[in-house]
Amino acid sequence: MRRLIVGNFLVAAGVVLLTMPAAHFVTGWRAQSVEVPAAPAALARQRPSEGEPLGRLVLPRLGLDLVVFEGTSDETLRKGPGHLSGTAWPDAGLAGGNCVIAGHRDTFFRKLASARTNDVLRVHGPSGISTYRLRERRIVGPEEAWVAARTAEPRITLITCYPFGYVGAAPYRLVWSATPVESAAR
């Protein structure tokens, strides 16, 4: 009888422990299947609210094609990479600046572990597609906020925790900087 109780308890505990990662996966999968409006007129005047889709981030060589959401709250980053509010958005019709996009290393940005200098990066925004190339890879501490500083020239900064195989809260951040190649309004 005692073994039956302990066995049932262990099975129940296993189900509970698996439910959280499964819910996290389902949340991201569902959020990534949303359709991002090709050219929302409202976005030209006002940014979406926290958690709303903002555009798409595509790294063709890595097979990465992700919806980017506005904001970097825990809830938003469960859905996909988040655009750091207050930073530029690489819109083909607008001037430059530093667009910062953050994502979790163990889900959406896992493929950044295989990224290389000169990989093509495309950002689909309200006015079209902006094309960038990854130029510089850095490993920094989490307190190094200068990577998100404003810039005069257009740039995309991708940030995720590092190292990729680390269990728990990672001690560093992987930062990729990308510079524009061309812009083609649609």
Image: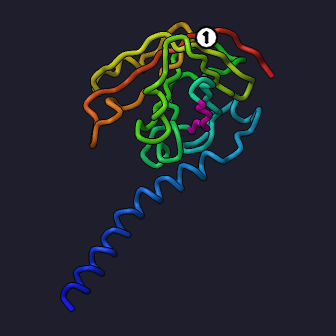
The image quadrant of residue 16 is bottom left
Q: Amino acid at mark 1?
A: Pro
Residue 150 picture location, percent across and down: 46, 15
Is 176 placed left or right of 66 in the picture? left
Residue 74, compared with residue 134, is above or below; it is below
Q: Which residues are magenta?
A: 63-69
The C terminus is located in which quarter?
A: top right
Looking at the image, which residue is at 33% across and 29% down?
A: 162
Between residue 72 and residue 2, name the one nearer to us: 2
The image quadrant of residue 13 is bottom left
Looking at the image, which residue is at 46% across and 54% down?
A: 24
Residue 79, compared with residue 104, is above or below; it is below
Is 75 placed left or right of 33 in the picture? left
Residue 121 picture location, percent across and down: 60, 20
Question: In this figure, which residue is indicated by the disc labeled 1?
Answer: 180
Examine the residues drawn in magenta and state their main secondary structure. Answer: strand
Residue 83 picture location, percent across and down: 52, 32
Is 97 placed left or right of 126 in the picture? left
Q: Is residue 65 magenta?
A: yes
Between residue 121 and residue 155, name the one nearer to us: 121
Which residue is at the far left? 2
The figure's colour scheme reads rainbow
Q: Is residue 5 magenta?
A: no
